[in-house]
């Protein structure tokens, strides 16, 4: 039976996932007004900065919850009717402040929702909070945006979709929207023990999200289960919401070398466990090699800084408005020779062509997500590493950023805990447009295990596994 939180009188509302909430609404065991009030109460009760909360959207959420309750009563419920959700604060929300984590944009109130937000709201989901991000999703975290890892505040929560991951893990919201340019959905999902999808490039609309790199940026859902990610993705991209837990005969590619060379033994063991579980469910494990991931990571970084500088080309008008990390990357991107940028684009084209041949032999790839559990941080967080950009590529996004370059769908799901009690995670990757298959494999793993049900000490207790 699927290991997922379902609505029962014994399960706290905050512990329910999206599927559990919808089941409760459908059976009239839950009411959207009750759920939103519970969600708002929890949001009000926590330390907003520590939990990644930038803005709470209370009055409008209550109005929309009342309308959702009427729709359930009259049989007019939409796919996500009454489900609370949060949005990373680089994604525009109509009439709700969208700060981009930036001093320069701290008072911006958009007139319109980003298309991704509009799609969720049109499906009945209720926006309850804007969630923390480092500046422009690529700089340092400003005061008010320094979310903490709910499993252990002495360890990093990841970035740049830090607020969504912390809020999900802390059971403040069951669904969130994030963005991912080099791992920004998947890194915090890995460190905080939640599930996050970087969809096929372009599958989910990016209109209304602040740009880091227009060719590497992805908008995607974050939740606590792969089933919930599929429900959200259907609304965001029309992919179909049904996942299958039947992986019999599926070919799972397991790359080594680069993806294991810098991986801690505990993370490698967790990835091996996932492979064994999928093998036990009938999947066939196949050893594969992904072409030149190190070169791909470098090409991705070159493209990112060049396009970041172009997207924010007026940065010289007010350099004091940017954090040190943003400014360093803007300077680097502006100074980058055009030839280097063009060579990086050519590398991407070549690796895409060569890489997609892998799927002649396998259906999905399985590898560790972040090579380590969440690293320890020492104040100030921005000085955590002497060379943050290099170590981001080598120790944080090492297994992730290549798939931004290639544009392939990639989901991160929890896969156990370290001896220090921190989440460990794996990544499942598919061919372009095969997002639902990737989520189905993740759902199959989660149907056979309970890692995704674990809650941090500050969260609600995990529900019993049915």
Image (cartoon, grey):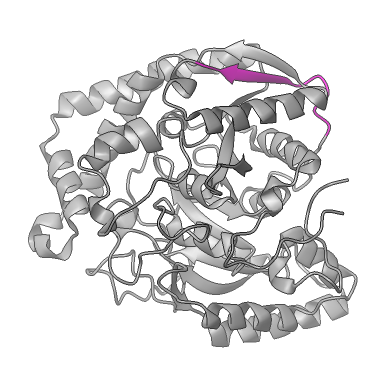
**Number of numbered discs:** 0
Where residue 82 sits in the image (x, y, percent)? 71, 73
Q: Is residue 19 left or right of residue 155?
A: right
Residue 316 sits in quarter: bottom left
Q: Is residue 231 magenta?
A: no
Which residue is at a point 82% across and 27% down the rendered structure image?
281
Q: Is residue 412 left or right of residue 146?
A: right
Q: Is residue 366 visible?
A: yes
The one nearer the camera, 74 or 58, is: 58
Magenta highlight range: 246-256
Where residue 202 sits in the image (x, y, percent)? 50, 41
Which residue is at a point 82% across and 76% down the rendered structure image?
30
Q: Is residue 253 magenta?
A: yes
Quadrant where the C terminus sits is bottom right
Where residue 400 sits in the image (x, y, percent)? 46, 34
Quadrant where the N terminus sits is top right
Residue 196, compared with residue 135, is above or below; it is above
Q: Is residue 429 visible?
A: no
* Residue projecting furthest to the front: 419
Where residue 313 sits in the image (x, y, percent)? 17, 51
Residue 460, compared with residue 227, is above or below; it is below
């Amino acid at each position: 039976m699927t290991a997922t939180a379902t609505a029962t009188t014994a399960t706290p509302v905050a512990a329910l996932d999206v599927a559990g909430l919808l089941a409760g609404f459908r059976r009239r065991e839950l009411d959207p007004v009750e759920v939103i009030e519970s969600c708002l109460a929890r949001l009000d009760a926590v330390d907003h900065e520590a939990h990644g909360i930038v803005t709470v959207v209370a009055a409008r959420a209550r109005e929309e919850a009342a309308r959702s309750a009427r729709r359930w009563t009259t049989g007019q419920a939409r796919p996500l009717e009454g489900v609370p959700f949060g949005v990373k604060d680089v994604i525009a929300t109509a009439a709700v402040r969208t700060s981009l984590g930036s001093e320069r944009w701290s008072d911006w109130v958009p007139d319109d929702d980003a298309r991704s937000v509009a799609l969720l709201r049109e499906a009945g989901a209720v926006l309850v909070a804007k969630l923390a991000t480092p500046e422009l999703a690529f700089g340092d975290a400003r005061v008010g945006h320094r979310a903490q890892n709910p499993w252990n505040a002495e360890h990093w929560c990841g970035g740049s979709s830090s607020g969504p991951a912390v809020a999900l893990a802390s059971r403040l919201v069951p669904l969130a929207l994030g963005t991912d340019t080099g791992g920004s959905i998947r890194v915090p999902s890995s460190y905080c023990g939640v599930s996050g999808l970087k969809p096929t490039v372009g599958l989910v609309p990016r209109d209304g999200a602040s740009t880091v790199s227009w060719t590497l940026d992805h908008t995607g859902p974050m939740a606590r289960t792969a089933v919930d990610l599929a429900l959200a993705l259907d609304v965001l991209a029309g992919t179909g919401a049904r996942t299958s837990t039947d992986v019999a005969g599926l070919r799972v590619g397991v790359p080594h070398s680069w993806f294991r060379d810098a991986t801690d033994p505990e993370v490698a063991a967790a990835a091996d466990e996932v492979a064994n579980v999928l093998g036990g469910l009938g999947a066939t494990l196949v050893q594969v090699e992904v072409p030149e991931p190190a070169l791909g990571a470098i090409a991705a970084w070159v493209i990112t800084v060049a396009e970041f500088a172009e997207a924010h080309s007026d940065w010289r008008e007010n350099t004091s408005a940017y954090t040190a990390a943003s400014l360093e990357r803007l300077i680097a991107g502006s100074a980058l020779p055009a030839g280097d940028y063009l060579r990086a684009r050519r590398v991407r084209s070549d690796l895409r062509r060569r890489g997609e041949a892998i799927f002649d032999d396998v259906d999905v790839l399985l590898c560790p997500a972040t090579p380590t559990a969440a690293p320890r941080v020492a104040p100030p967080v921005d000085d955590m590493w002497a060379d943050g950009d290099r170590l981001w590529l080598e120790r944080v996004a090492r297994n992730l950023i290549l798939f931004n370059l290639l544009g392939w769908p990639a989901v991160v799901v929890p896969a156990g805990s370290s001896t220090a009690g921190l989440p460990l995670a794996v990544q499942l990757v598919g061919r372009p447009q095969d997002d639902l298959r990737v989520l189905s494999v993740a759902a199959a793993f989660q149907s056979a295990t309970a890692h995704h049900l674990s809650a941090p000490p500050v969260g609600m207790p995990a529900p019993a596994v049915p």
